[in-house]
Amino acid sequence: MLRPKISFANNNEKLNLGEWKNGPHLSEGRVIPSHPVETFPVGQKGLQNQPKPPSLSRDDHADPFNFSFSSNKLILRKLHDYVKNVNFEEMKKNECKKNLTLSKYWENSQQRYVPEDDSWEKFYSNIRSCSVYSDDAMVDKLLHDLNTMPIKNVHIMDGGTQVKFVFTFKNDKQAVFKPMRFGRDYESDPNHFYFSDFERHHAEIATFHLDRVLGFRRAIPTVGRVLNMTTELFEKAEKKLKKTFFFSPAKNFCFVSRCDYYCDTTHAICGFPDMKEGSVQVFLPDESAVPRKHNRNPYRRTYSKKNQIAEWQNNMNYCTDKVKTKQQYAHGRRLLDLVDLHVLDYLIGNQDRHHFESFNVFDNVPSYAIHLDHGRAFGRSDFDDDDILLPLRQCCIIRPSTFETLLKFYSAPKSLTTALHESMSKDPAHPILAYKHYPAIERRLAKVMTYILECFESRKVEEVLISEFHNLDVSDLEQNEEDQSEEHQEKNDVKKTV
Ligand SMILES: Nc1ncnc2c1ncn2[C@@H]1O[C@H](COP(=O)(O)OP(=O)(O)OP(=O)(O)O)[C@@H](O)[C@H]1O
Ligand SMILES: [Mn+2]
């Protein structure tokens, strides 16, 4: 809770000190600042006001690039020098040996044909064996539909810990909705653990764009949408959700919903007065048709208040001893995927990568890590958690395409945040990120480049830049049983937290 700071106004003639001595009775005796001043020590911050959707405010004319950031010329020169003889085009060809679409794969292997009648079906049938999507125009159309299509009904989404809904649109296709809780500039409470931090809908949108700008195309298309809470949420809500709507004392329309964390009246989500912004993310195809595997991240944090340091945070040989030797990581793309995922997480400040999912549908083609669940990213603009980069630093491998893209942005002329800003400007709810995150992203990119340079300096470039990882000491056998048991353990672990 914010406590208004009480101060005496210099020119307040009505101020009656005698009365004040006996205890204040008159409101004229104090000035309550219109912007409450924080008086609590750090870590005791109250919940910030829920502002109206930024996209409904007048245009923000602030300069997003009002900061100076230049690449370290020495690091840049060294990096270019190390890779001057690397044939990136050749190496990139080996990163993905078979890049099939799901529809082609099914057609060839099972004579199964999939419909492509709307944006969802087009998206599903074009899921690839090396990326979630590839056709930007098709995805842009899908984003448009997610933003505009009439909503038929709204359900509370099962699974996960915080409030989210499943939207079913008039074409019976679905999406995950995460509502806005705070303004764009909200900074996470530094005393909150990564596992109890509030989710930020705009982090989901921003990460989708960053993932695309970085060329991964493994995040799920997500768009901002401003909803009328009465006609689009309340009137379409299932009964148990509808029951949780109410009007706040300020006459705003609010809901509590049902979930494990923060679904109570003190954490209600309120409109302004009944407009609510949120992120709308396309639903992945039903698991009965397109199954997914849930993989435990070997670089997961402890999710425990008592025991906060995981083994990988203490042991710099963790990758060599415990990951590169594991059946699932010893051969193919998975370790490179993990490094990509953690580079992305570092840039967005996501500490909450407890597991990752992969499609389990293309037989005999290695599956990739889907970039999913970024609601806890962009919580801090003043802090870089270098632990997130430990997979890169310890394993010292990176995909040539990833390195090339990072180097391109680090070399300018177009900076990473310029490209990101351009991409996010297309979202109807823009601006998506508070601009203070831009220098943070550039600062983190510089650190990624420094760590890559350290790898080049400590081993051969051709050991660092690799299209596929192979640990010749580990046999290359299919192995799934371990995955399954880990998945089970993973689910139990997550439920135990907080
Ligand atoms: N777009 C989507 N389509 C289909 N399923 C989804 C989608 N997004 C999330 N899910 C499923 O819902 C689960 C929970 O979602 P998410 O991870 O975003 O919520 P969460 O509250 O952060 O959960 P957790 O606390 O378990 O991380 C995911 O593990 C995933 O299987
Ligand atoms: Mn999560």
Image (tube, rainbow, N blue to C red):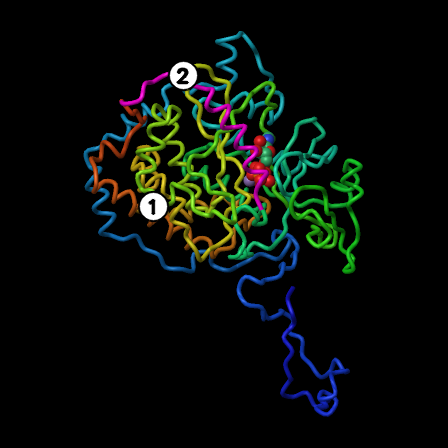
User: Residue placed at 71% from the left, 55% from the top?
Assistant: 266
Q: Is residue 253 left or right of residue 491?
A: right
Quadrant location of ligand 1? top right
Along the line of sight, the residue nearer the viewer: 428 or 353: 353
The part of the image, by quadrant, that contains residue 40 is bottom right
Quadrant of the rendered image containing residue 36: bottom right
Is 482 a magenta residue?
yes
Nearer the camera: disc 2 or disc 1: 2
Report the residue marked by disc 2.
478
Determine if the magenta segment contains residue 315.
no
The amino acid sitting under disc 1 is Val
Residue at the extreme bottom of the image, as rendered: 18
Q: Which residue is mark 1?
A: 448
Pointer 2 or 1: first along the chain: 1
For image coordinates 74% across by 54% down, the residue present is 273
Residues shaded magenta: 473-498
